[in-house]
Image (cartoon, rainbow, N blue to C red):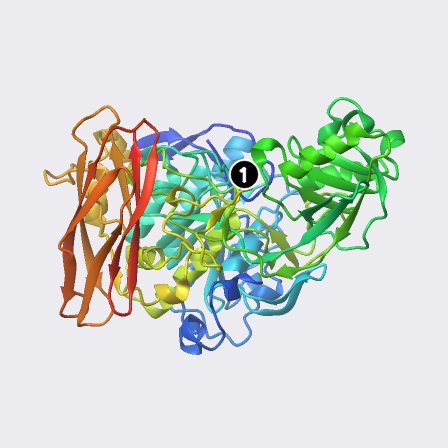
Amino acid sequence: MYMWFTWIRPRSHHSTVILELPKYAMPDEMLSLHTTHSPQFLGLKSGSGLWSASNLTSDVIVGVIDTGIWPEHLSFRDSGMPPVPSRWKGKCEAGTRFSPSNCNKKIIGARIFSKGYEAAAGKINETEDYRSPRDSQGHGTHTASTAAGNLVMGANLFGLGKGLAGGMSYGSRIAVYKACYIQGCSSSDILAAIDQAVIDGVDVLSLSLGGFPKPFYADNIAIAAFGAVQHGVFVSCSAGNSGPLSSSVGNAAPWIMTVAASSLDRSFPTTVKLGDGRVFKGASLYQGKPTKQLPLVYGRTEGGEGAEFCTNGTLSSRLVKGKIVVCEKGLNARAEKGEQVKIAGGAGMIMVNRDEEGEELYADPHVLPGTSLGASAGIAIKSYINSTKTATASIKFEGTVYGNRAPIVAAFSSRGPSAAGPDIIKPDVTAPGVDILAAWPPNISPSMLKSDKRSVLFNILSGTSMSCPHVSGLAALLKSVHRDWSPAAVKSALMTTAYTLDKERTPIADAVSETSISATPFGIGSGHVDPEKASNPGLIYDISTEDYLRYICSLNYNSSQIALLLRKNYTCPSHVLKSPGDLNYPSFAVLFDSKSRNLIQTFKRSVTNVGNPMSTYVVQVNTPSGVSVTVKPKILKFQKKGQKLRYKMRVVARGKRSAGDSTFGSLVWFSRTRIVRSPIAITWQ
């Protein structure tokens, strides 16, 4: 089996080997990787709240399972840091261009896991990758710095996004576990890395990678993460980049924090002006002078078969030299299209989305004047080219712009309902994952093209790979403030305090639509993370190992499947949950049989008071259409901190609905100072 990094890049092919577990065997899988302004966007302020000195001097350790790290980067210096915590049991492994001396008081551990990868893909080619924790792809360096990189003044990419760069928990330590290489990440290596990280003593694990949705007993990340959570380790994973396809969300086990991707209020816009006067807005990381009004070509006017995608060898130098070339997205990497235009002598490139890709724009560090445009602009431009023999266009680069509507959930972000566990809303939350600036190895070009000789210290990437380490770092901050909180408590705090209205106080939009339809819980889960509110959530929904075991027993897995998931034989007790939906989760996924007449479900929950000792909460339900909802009791009165109170929610469907229909609402507990919100998703199957 294969996994891929969850950033927006070409994906590797599948291959299969066998992973051996004690007494059990399952197919291995190769998985792939799923990235200055985000701290401010998230409300983190230097010297106050979670970013006050007392909270940032903690020794919380963030484990990053990825492509490794570039240890010499400014983001990983250890100036002024106290000694490594005595509880730390990890080590720095020597290898190609990496020695134990590359670790310091910031990077306190670095290990490599490659047995599964080499069994599937062959021996690591050390001319392309490092047989060591050193990063040859940039992804691991980027994600590690996003979670816990140091503050670096004047960070930028070609002058874009310039400012103070820093990880969400920039005072935390980093432990590196390299398990991802050129062709992906073996799931057996991921499992081994997670297990080792737990033994070493990490507090938080960040995994910006994943594979196809599958049952939890066949998912090595779910298997290993369950072991980690039992030892008090918070596990954050990217949701995947297969959106807007329904039920594409990965890493959906309820003990994992599954993170979707959304935009910041920062963009890198361009202006494309056609010869007939029409103007379109695009996005690009290219920085240079605007082009002149130049001839515009597309399809047969730029080359032979396949030229519309600007793939290798399809463009004719005779037809494109000195012109702006229109390239459709697909088949090859976005920056590679510009490379092909440049090789053929073109003067610029306009990359347009196909209809199914909608209006979402990607900002890329093109090697020539280039920009991306949405599908509607692409249709208009192609029609213009076909209507005249003298089509022209110009491209102007606008730099860095702030104040855009945000957040907007990214179209690429994988969506629910979860195919592996539809009884839990996934993803859990959304976080910044579009055009994220973070650390980058200086020997890897920003476009990742071999022909691109530019060297940068920071790069701008998009993907759920980028949103995941934001939440990993925020979890580290919460752990620094609440050392006694369980992983489920941290997760609950981030979920119940998340917001669903954007900066303009309108519902968070979905980039899949030009008309900005509202995002649903299947796109953003509980909403966009709000770390300062999460640090004092009022109530939490806690979940113990025993609760998770009862949940697993309610999934109708057979004894062999449960043994695979738990990595040991286990006999389910007689008092299992009546339904998976009774897990004490901070959200509600209600499943109704569209063919049944008796459509009533009751959910049980328990909330723990972590706020004011004497506090009263009153319930309010935003009822989804097609159902009625009652909650008992309607008022929760707490007498002390740590007290637990229970309630029930009863949902009754009204009338018939078609299979596949979904409606959404929320259940909110209000006190004088706190709002504790849980989304409700009703789905007819």
- 481 vs 636: above or below: below
Q: Determine whether, in the image, residue 24 is placed left or right of residue 307.
A: left
Q: Determine whether, in the image, residue 680 is placed left or right of residue 94.
A: left
Q: Which of 100/196 is in front?
A: 196
The reply to whether residue 118 is in sight is: yes
Quadrant that contains the C terminus: top left
Q: Which residue is mark 1?
A: 184
Q: Would you identify the image quadrant in which residue 437 lies?
A: bottom right
Query: Dot 1: within a 10 Å radius of its alpha carbon, few (fewer than 14), some, or many (20 or more) residues?
Result: many
Q: Which of 548/117 is in front?
A: 548
Q: Which of 245/133 is in front?
A: 245
- 301 vs 443: above or below: above
Residue at 16% in and 61% down: 636
- 101 vs 565: above or below: below
In x, y percent, where is residue 381? Answer: 73, 35
In x, y percent, where is residue 133? Answer: 55, 52
In x, y percent, where is residue 37? Answer: 56, 63
